[in-house]
Amino acid sequence: MRPAVSVAFAVAALFATAARADDINVKIGVLSDMSSLYADISGPGSVVAAKMAVQDFNPAAHGMKVDVVSADHQNKPDVGSNIARQWYDVDHVDAIVDVPTSSVALAVADVTREKNKVFLISGAATSDLTGPKCSPNNVHWTYDTWMLANGTGKALVKTGGDTWFFITADYAFGHALERDTTNVVQANGGKVLGSVNVPLNTPDFSSYLLQAQASKAKIIGLANAGGDTINAIKQGAEFGITAGGQHFAGLLVFISDVEALGLKTAQGLVLTSTWYWDMNDANRAWAKRWQAERPGKFPTMVVAGVYSSVLHYLKAVAALKSAADGKAVVDKMKAMPTDDPLFGKGTVRVDGTVTHPAYLFEVKKPEESKYPGDDFKLRATIPADEAFRPLKDDNCPLVTSN
Amino acid sequence: MFQIFGIPSQALFGQLLLGLINGSFYALLSLGLAVIFGMLNIINFTHGAQYMMGAFAAYLLLQHLGINYWAALVIVPIIVGLTGIIVERLFLQQLQKLDPLYGLLLTFGLALIIEGLFRNYYGSSGLPYGVPDALQGGRNLGFMFLPNYRAWVIGFSLVICFATWFAIERTRLGSYLRAATENPTLVRAFGINVPRMVMLTYGFGVALAALAGVMAAPIYNVSPQMGSDIIIVVFAVVVIGGMGSIMGAIITGFTLGIVEGLTKVFFPEASNTVIFAIMIVVLLVRPAGLFGRGA
Amino acid sequence: MATVAQAAALKARHDSERSVGVAFAIMLAFLVAGPFLLYPVFLMKALCFALFACAFNLLIGYVGLVSFGHALYFGWASYLTAYAAKSWGMQPEIAILIGTATAAALGIVAGIVAIRRQGIYFAMITLALAQMMYLVALRLPLTGGEDGIQAVPRGRLFGLFDLNHEMTMYIFVLVVVLAAFLLIYRIINSPFGEVLKAIRENEPRTISLGYQTDRYKVVAFVLSATLAGLAGSVKALVFQLASLTDVHWTMSGEVLLMTLVGGLGTIFGPVVGAFLIVAMENYLASFGQWVLIIQGAIFVVCVLVFRRGIVGELAHRLHVRL
């Protein structure tokens, strides 16, 4: 008995050391907005999610060693590309995750492609990342502008919201959102009555709201984000827009924005999201673990996307037994079907888009909300094959070359 | 319904009124800046941050102590004014004999610290603050729907502005103040405690900013960056008006609010640059500003 | 008597030239050895900011004019350089010239407007002008708005040297920055520079001596804006990117901080300050939230107890001019 045990021990020890010597080292960099406009939708919460993914993946069992580092890109493309370059050149980072703010994501995508690493996008919205500017090193996990416009626009027109007025943030992202939504509205038989371009970070929307009110459109589309969306909705409630029978459609609204507005102001707002913490038991259990690190906050779809994309990435690296060749890892990610507790089963398309269902939510009335974070009710589910832009409309060079 | 420059008159009146509301905030903030500048010869760069602190204080009082809007209108300016007094005692006093440039740099640094701290603790998406119950709803003026709260903002800020003007230009205390600005040594010879007066003036200027913050909380989003957004515009307002007179600051604030409101109708894309454009024209024509006394 | 004073003055001048020479030699040695020890992209960034801060210092340190809007020249020059290199396919040296000329033109306009008021008003006006042009940059198609101009080609210098090679780029940046640094040193020590310093010390007196001080101030302003523009142009090529960051008012605050930390009105101060602040931002990137707070705290500490700055303090202790 005794010798057998010691032999077993010796063998185990041998294997353990052997595994350690062959450990595949992987370093993941969470690059996000830690302090500014988008810190609440991703930022520190994304770091927590990435670490949870590593923990759940259990690197030791796969003979891997995974480190997570993080940095703040402050929403500035120059800071972001600088950090990315330094991470890849000096710190041996293999993959960058998250990166909210489309401008920074585009810059990071350039660097990632140049250095042949992997870019797991969750926080950035622009559909250019999987369109004209797609790259063999990108995986775009959570959502994009096309999907938001399509989800919200189509659903509203079909349920009677057939006349629209846009309040648009006067910069590239706002115009893209307005353009995409206009196409969807018109394609479904709706009409756009007018729009007004509003300078970014405008504190006072009253003047534009009056113009929207005068248009008599049924739906006021908010082609803006963050603080601008919050201000517009808040002031809209004050001017009796919703009371007067008009409805807001937030084209990019997160649960953190709804929390900031309060249900009293935000009630009735319609929005599209790919993940909601209170949808099923798996999500609730995950959110609870996440909240242990982020007390009082609620995980957004971006944070969930970080978790799932890191998990899938690590699976691909484990299958390849190397993280060195970024393009090869991404190809592997595309070859393997995705399957995780938060987004379920899906695929990574050739252009880098990850397909999964999207959901149309309506913000609850205060009296319908039973507990903190009980903010949304489901209005419709958009199946995975309809939620994202069809490959043929991508204008992505990767698609045509295939 | 008649039309003016192709815009229906009702829309125009509505926008004029809305401009007046923005003007209220410009007026309150530039008034505070002018009061502080008059006494301390310092451009208070922290003004925006103190305005933000006012809004946050109102939010925190409501959230943690259940203190409502009306009480906050009184309490918050006092609290934030006191922090201003501490700043004056700890920092600004040491800069009295130096180039005013250093005052600008110091207050700029303080503004960065305050904004950073609030961002750290409260994030940046902002926090909700409801309109007080008594001012819920609004009335239809025929040409527009005017929320009661906005009407209150215009009225109340006019009262505060003119009360300040009266206190400084028409009372004995105010005359000491103005005299101390002109010649502190002489005023001290009359047995008036000038350093204390300076301290209280700064506290008062800061309290005005905080008051504006409380008033802004139900309209705008309470967020750490609300101050830095508005302060540069207020600087331009101050340059246009010239800091010579209290009345100048008030009138310029309200007028520019209206001008900005009109731009939002005729040329919305330029609505955030119009004040700066006016500043350039004024500087070329009247370098001292509309109400200024010399350079 | 007169000859003794003259000799003393001559000796002082000689001493100061020697101390500047020694300091310059140390700086040069550091910059030549730098890329072998440190990350070259970091060094190039610090060099660009060093030039930016030196240009800024020309105004604040030697004329006593506080511009709170220098991001305007830095940022717009970098936009035009990036645009020329990317959309017009210009060679890098031409693109940099276009950017720098843009900064000069903006400097002339802003200088003429802002010079009408003095002191703190001047600071507020420059800030307001820069903010206006920031808002313009936000919407013009030329600047790419929020995305900025990305993937700017570095190209071949004079059609000969491939700047995509990191070391070639570093040498190019080093040469440009050192040349501009020596130019600034020359300006400060020219008769023109003496008039500027006289304006700083006592403007009414300078006027009474028959100088049209406003003209001198505008010229100094334009020079400063132009050199700031040169820094911005080079930066656009180093990072292959021009973005809103460079025109935002926080950039104006940052260059002010660099100059203040290093030492207002010192020759090497802005360089030291720029390297320090850039290094700090680099290492604090993971503490994102705290960068603002730390920068603010440095401002406060510098103003209260450390007004001479690092180099100023060093020069004071050693009784030399640096």
Image (cartoon, rainbow, N blue to C red):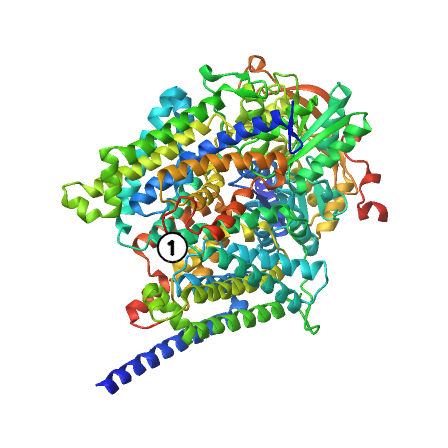
Quadrant in the rendering for residue C192: bottom left
- Give C310 or C105, whichever is nearer the viewer: C105
Instruction: Measuring from the top left, give residue B145's x and y in whole percent.
Output: 57, 20
Residue A20 in percent (x, y) is at: 60, 49
Is the N terminus of chain B in the top left, top right, bottom left or bottom right quadrant? top right
Measuring from the top left, give residue C176's x and y in whole percent.
Answer: 56, 70
- Relative to A26, does residue C311 appear above or below in the rendering? below
Type of amino acid at the residue the image marks with label 1: Gly
The residue to which callout 1 is attached is: C119
Q: Chain of mark 1?
A: C
Q: Is residue A369 above or below residue A68?
A: above
Residue placed at 39% from the left, 55% from the top?
Answer: C118
For image coordinates 59% across by 35% down, the residue present is B264
Question: Relative to residue C138, is residue A346 depicted above or below?
Answer: above
Secondary structure of the residue carrying tag 1 is: helix
User: Would residue A56 be seen by someone viewing this image from the given angle?
Assistant: no
Residue C305 at least partly seen: yes
Q: Observer-nearest residue: A37 or A400? A: A37
Q: Residues within 10 Å of mark 1 (few under 14, many from 20)?
A: some
